[in-house]
Image (cartoon, helix red, strand yellow):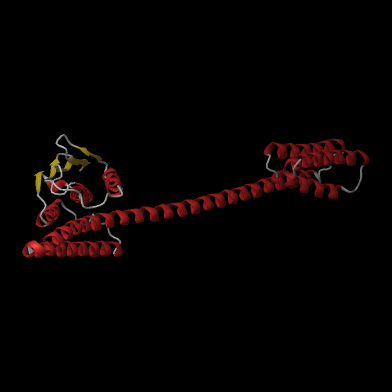
Amino acid sequence: MTPRDGAPRLIVGAAAGTCALFVSTALVAHDDGWLLLLLLSIIAFLAGRIRARPTGALAVTLLLGGVAASQVINYDDNNIVPEIMLPLTLYLAGIALRSRELLVSRLSEQANEINAERDTYAQLSIRYERARIAAELHDVVAHALSMMVVQASAGQRLADRDPARAADTFKIIATAARQAETDLDRLADLLARDTSPDDGAHLGLLHEIVDTARASGLPIRLRVSGDTSSVTGTVAHAALRFVQEGVTNALRYAPGAAIEVVADARPGTLELSVTNGKATAPARLGLGSGRGLTGLRERIAACGGTLDAGPDPEEGWSIRAWIPC
């Protein structure tokens, strides 16, 4: 038996014993009522402190029953009020103190839970922010590096037989590098100012992505249709990253293939697609990690949209997305 289990029984037993003492004192007319009153008050207070309320009430009932029995046997108008009110008051005081301790305990537990949830939320926020930064860096760097690697390979082949075209190729590499540097500076500035990369994004920037890719020699075309004025910055930013990822994948896996980028702003939905034909040259870049497409799928899903990627009937590849706007 644990102390917690034994305390209620002990208090009930003490109350029953005190009740018997009151009755016996009244029977033999002892003059030590103040000691019994002190004992009565202590037990009543402890009865209010125990966790089991019915057991405490039983103990107090036994005590007051002893007082009532003693008064029936030997009525004393001077003792009846303190003998009833003092233990009853201390019993209620014990209940109030116990309730306060339980309240403090519950509040302490809730505070600990809140602190634990806050720490968990902070850790999740850090992980989410790291993933967001990693996705932004991947989108910016992977696109630029893929283009530079392809053009560098072309420049090496042209260096001896066509120096003029080789020089143009290296200019394209420098332009891609400067664009990547500008994008990284913009991303670092946004992170330093704790603002979202979505700020200032719009579908007009699709033309910059396509023009840069076309300047590097890629056979690419863009078609934008519908009313794009209702497209939010968040959706526009997702669309920009979608096109970047699609062009990068086409450049990586289907060199020389024609690329078509479509952005169709329909009522309530922005439909995007990047489609490339069959490769006309062997791939010169290694296989990717798949992280870009996974991150893109998560980005589109975060906007409430869906993404589909796979081969098309003409031995090419296409990725499509539908984003509510």
Q: Percent position (x, y) of residue 91?
A: 71, 45
Outermost residue toward the front?
160
Locate the C terminus by quadrant: top left
> Which residue corresponds to the image point at 13% horizontal and 64% vertical from the top-left?
170
> Which residue corresponds to the image point at 74% horizontal and 47% vertical from the top-left?
86
**Is any part of residue 202 visible from this angle?**
yes
Count of residue discs: 0
Outermost residue toward the right?
28
Outermost residue toward the top?
313
> Which residue corresponds to the image point at 75% horizontal and 39% vertical from the top-left?
59
Q: In this view, does 105 lie to the left or right of 323?
A: right
Q: Percent position (x, y) of residue 40?
A: 79, 45
Q: Is residue 294 left or right of residue 210?
A: right
302 or 174: nearer the viewer:
174
> Which residue corresponds to the image point at 85% horizontal and 41% vertical from the top-left?
22
61 or 1: nearer the viewer:
1
